[in-house]
Image: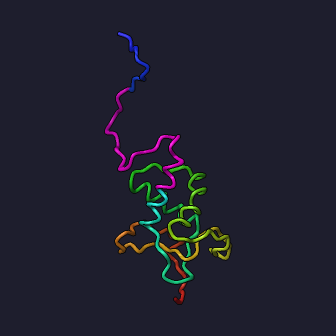
Amino acid sequence: MQNTSNERTVPPSRGTPRRPARPQPSQGKLEGYVPDLLREFLRKEVRPGICPNCDLTANEILEVLGAYCERHGWRWPSIVLTRRYLSQIVMEVYGVAESHSVKRDGKNCRGYRGVEWRPCGDSEGTAPVPEEATVVPEVEC
């Protein structure tokens, strides 16, 4: 008997399929998925800085975002789309504009002033802080 419908037959998968905690977007829906993912991540893992000298680089945020997605079993979104939306979403959530002069290792980096990681004990914060971000210079508030 031949399949007369236009539907493709999908062979059964081998092993136990891993079910994601969040629906994964199709390739055409990435445009909407990335901003939503960034909003959720930033609200849960970043907070307004306690002191005026707190800052995060874009690379630090993206590194922790990757670990956050992995921990939740979500697909890592396109880095190009993520970078494109990051400054827009940080501005929307925290009212902080991107700076090109956040200092790391004596060099200027792209990043955001006035925001910091939520502490692990915080009711929201659970993101693993990247190694270079754990060395925070002594700052007087």
Q: Which residues are magenta?
A: 11-36
User: Going 54% across and 87% down the picture, which residue do you hit?
Assistant: 139
Snapshot quadrant of residue 128 = bottom left
Asked whether 18 falls inside the magenta stretch, the response is yes
Q: Is residue 11 above or below residue 2?
A: below
Front residue of 24/128: it is 24
Q: Quadrant of the N terminus?
A: top left
User: Going 44% across and 55% down the picture, which residue do you hit?
Assistant: 69
Q: Is residue 70 above or below residue 55?
A: above
Residue 105 vs residue 123: left or right? right
Principal secondary structure, stretch drawn in magenta = loop
Front residue of 8/35: it is 35
Front residue of 43/57: it is 43
- x%, y% of residue 124? 37, 69
Snapshot quadrant of residue 58 = bottom right
User: Going 46% across and 73% down the picture, which residue do you hit?
Assistant: 47
**Image mark count:** 0
